[in-house]
Image (tube, rainbow, N blue to C red):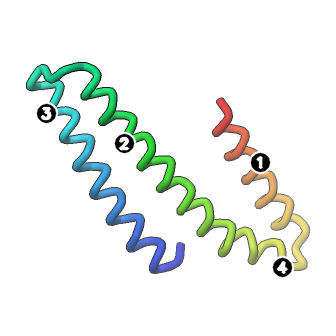
Amino acid sequence: MREDTQTSTKKRLARIEGQVRGVAKMVEDDRYCIDIVRQVQAIKAALSSLERIVLDDHLETCVETALKSDDMNQRRAKVAELVAILDGRKK
């Protein structure tokens, strides 16, 4: 993972961690269910955004390197890895 992506990822994870703690506090305080659901949706959106950033970094580093390689097994492995992770997103 590139250094800038790693820094951005750490910041986003800290923010998401704070959001999750906030939701736990909302549940503890018996807050209105719809308010809790809205916060959960915000967390899911933040996680999806984080996923895109990490996947983009992976494509621009690991996958690009593999595709430029003369090693056909490495190429196939990276393509299979991407197919598996993208297929898992649909479920």
- In this view, the residue in front, 75 or 22, is 22
Disc 1: CA contacts within 10 A as few (<14), some (14-19) or many (>=20):
few
Amino acid type of the residue tagged 1 in the rendering: Val
Give yes or no for contact between labels 2 and 4 (Cβ–Cβ under 8 Å). Answer: no
Give yes or no for contact between labels 1 and 3 (Cβ–Cβ under 8 Å). Answer: no
Residue 43 quadrant: top left
Q: Is 82 located above or below residue 61 in the figure? A: above
**Label 3: which secondary element:** helix
From the viewer's perspective, tell me whether residue 59 is left or right of residue 16: right
Amino acid type of the residue tagged 3 in the rendering: Lys
Disc 3: CA contacts within 10 A as few (<14), some (14-19) or many (>=20):
few
Q: Which mark is residue 25?
A: 3
**Label 2: which secondary element:** helix
Q: CA distance from mark 2 to mark 4?
A: 36 Å
Look at mark 1 in the image and give the residue it sits on: 83
Q: Quadrant of the C terminus?
A: top right
- From the image, state whether disc 3 or disc 4 is nearer to you: 3
Look at mark 4 in the image and give the residue it sits on: 68
